[in-house]
Amino acid sequence: MARRFNILENATDFDGFKAFMKEPRGGGSLDVSVAANIVEDVKNRGAVAVVEYTTKFDKLDLNVSTLASSQVDLEALASKCPENVKAAIKFAAKRIEYYHAQQMPSDHRFVDDDGVDMAWRWGPIDAVGLYVPGGRASYPSSVLMNAIPAKVAGVKRMVMVAPAPEGNLNPAVAYAALTVGITEFYPIGGAQAVAALAYGAGPLLPVDKIVGPGNAFVAAAKRIVFGDVGIDTIAGPSEITVVADGKNDPAWIAADLLSQCEHDPAAQSILITSDQGFAEKVEIAVKEQLESLSTQATATTAWENHGAIVIAPMDRAAQLVDIIAPEHVEFAVDDPEELVDSVRHAGAMFVGRYGPEALGDYVTGSNHVLPTSGAARFSSGLSSLDFMKRTSIQRISVEAFAALSEAAETLAIAEGLPAHANSVSIRKN
Amino acid sequence: MARRFNILENATDFDGFKAFMKEPRGGGSLDVSVAANIVEDVKNRGAVAVVEYTTKFDKLDLNVSTLASSQVDLEALASKCPENVKAAIKFAAKRIEYYHAQQMPSDHRFVDDDGVDMAWRWGPIDAVGLYVPGGRASYPSSVLMNAIPAKVAGVKRMVMVAPAPEGNLNPAVAYAALTVGITEFYPIGGAQAVAALAYGAGPLLPVDKIVGPGNAFVAAAKRIVFGDVGIDTIAGPSEITVVADGKNDPAWIAADLLSQCEHDPAAQSILITSDQGFAEKVEIAVKEQLESLSTQATATTAWENHGAIVIAPMDRAAQLVDIIAPEHVEFAVDDPEELVDSVRHAGAMFVGRYGPEALGDYVTGSNHVLPTSGAARFSSGLSSLDFMKRTSIQRISVEAFAALSEAAETLAIAEGLPAHANSVSIRKN
């Protein structure tokens, strides 16, 4: 049974809901020292350490001078990907590329009122490392969503790492990697792969930024190397909030709620509706659909521990969504534009009764790497901008210098920085 | 004596230079557990804990229900700020506001080839916390550089914290805070202030993002709360690289090198020139200027431990700058545009013989919060964008659903996510 809050009939349920939103949803605390030791070891011993950890954790032998394995051939694996999956990957890749190309920023230059010639210029990061997890979370869609914005941004060197336990790697992941133009691939994973990307290991030269999801060890390693290289945000468990009126098919909405529940026992699905009868029907539909789901165990745990149904007047829906600041939100109501306008905090909005969130996981073109755990209050989904950096350029003429020097000198002296002041005053004549 | 590399005459000096750039520059390792304990304590005990730590570390008594002190009145302090400093702060604020207003992003909406209505929308973060350090690093310019982009972005609630040991706070900082329209102020600092901003403490409600420089405890606390709230990047010691030909006045270039050395014993100033005689003259000028500098001790340590002079052919200058990826770079040469075009990694460029970097610390309008320690390879200076977030919006019509559903279903099944597939297939008819 998911949690139930009836704000329509019981005003104090609003406080209950707010308290519920503050409950931690696990992921839990990892002993960072394990990851830290591995990172330090790889930093010191390079490829030799990476080979040892890969033998130990993945039962895979690597050549120490190439970090390759004869058991893992990307082209051979990709050829095993079924044709319909290949076609879907190509379709998705094309749409993702089109969307992210629209995000490319413009350079800018202007001369301001004081005659100072100011500008900035965007440029791509040189080299990016893409972490692809092993096991169940080895998703071709993640390869597309992380690599394509980098490619669009103009990143020249795209290094993919993915653990291949006993030589196993998802053929669809291999096909996606070839589709997006990965320039280097190493069948390695865990904290050792993150360290190898950050500090280099034999043939793998260091990259500038590391992106992509991973398990707790990978997340810990990314936190450790943060600063020495760029990292994306640390991804938390998935979330969906659905705002729905009573005119929806309860089974559709139940399916949408379960689509996030099946990702992770710590995932969170929340229904907001003003229709109590509809809420009951959705709850029943969730139970029915759970019965035939191969991901039943995970989805049930997530729904029972973290799911919620909030009955509330529709004019409070935007307020409730903003308290959640969900990764994904669906608006399945007659006038969704009102909600689009008034909700301020959400990673991605899906508007209309035919907009299940799963479309955005794969093919709308928008990025599925989105802020979780309320981070939509202060951060955004992955974009082309995350693979670029901006240099500010100030061209200072003698006249511009004359306009700026006095104030700069005054502030430098006020801040007790005489050498700053001197670098200005020495140019005065 | 700064380090010397003569790539012009000795090719192996290039390897020496690259090794030199990898030398750590301290900041050193802090025992994070001290900061972690304080953060945990404030999280649990709120304002009471903040008051205790402030009494203990800052010898300042706070009212537990207001977190205010009768000894620290922002308006009264601001009135003590000298008139010429007030004018310089106003001049700088106006320029910084103008520059950052130009950075405001546009929303975007388009219907793509498959008939899908895609969009994104930018919005401001609701509440931002601005940390202002105490002691020597309590700079009014930092208040401007951190708060103005937030104000321009549309942030409604701007909370400033600054330690006020025994009631002392820099009047210029108080004046800058009033100038930029800080909405709340608390005279608190250290890890306890960071925790109070992140999790709330009595009258101080939690903010969404924390920015601003601080000492090692503050940096550690920011790392700890990262994820629960947004943080800016962790700032390292300052850096300047100057590319200069022999036509410059050596004293001007020496002054520019020292302007960063005086910030921090771990600061790094590097001169790149093809003129060996000029290099000698700069080195002599540095020594002369150091003698009369009140910040002599700091600047001398930085110059001797981390400073360098690189003699190299001018056509290698861009390559050298990119290896450094400096926070600031000056181009004091006849044809600086060639360098502007070819250098890829730098936080901010200062172009022309009349462009000392110190102008950018205060008044060019560009932000002085910039990537250090080579982070310009993968990150940018602070901007209006850092105080906004982007929501992706997908409006899915029945027709768009028909165009997208097959590929989404195929990929969901291929990824072993049946509930994802079901949320699509259930809408087919």
Image: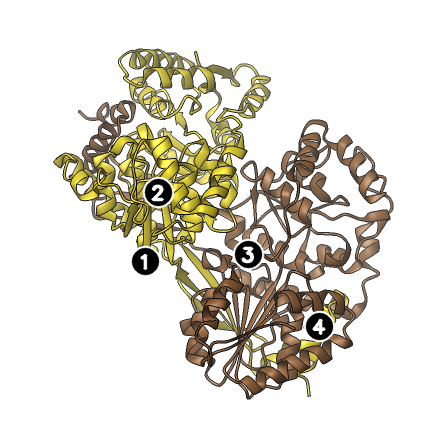
Chain colours: A brown, B yellow
- The chain ID associated with circle 2 is B
Tag of residue B156: 1
- Chain letter belonging to callout 1: B
The earlier-in-sequence mark between 1 and 4 is 1
Which chain's residue wears label 3? A
Q: Do labels 1 and 4 share a chain?
A: yes
**Residue A382 marker:** 3
Tag in front: 2 or 4: 4
Q: Residue A98: give x, y in percent of width and height.
A: 57, 65
Amino acid carrying label 3: it is Leu
Few, some or many C-alpha atoms within 10 Å of disc 4 (few <14, some 14-19, many ≥20)? many
Chain label for disc 4: B
Q: Which residue position is annotated with label 2?
A: B367
Q: Which of marks 1 and 3 is in front?
A: 1
Which amino acid lies under the numbered mark 1 shown in the image of this protein? Answer: Lys
Cα–Cα span, label 3 and label 2: 24 Å
- Residue B419, numbered label: 4
Q: Is residue B322 left or right of residue A44?
A: left
Secondary element type, mark 3: loop
* Quadrant housing the C terminus of chain A: top left
The residue located at (60%, 72%) in the rendering is A357
**Label 1, label 4: how far apart the Cα atoms are:** 40 Å
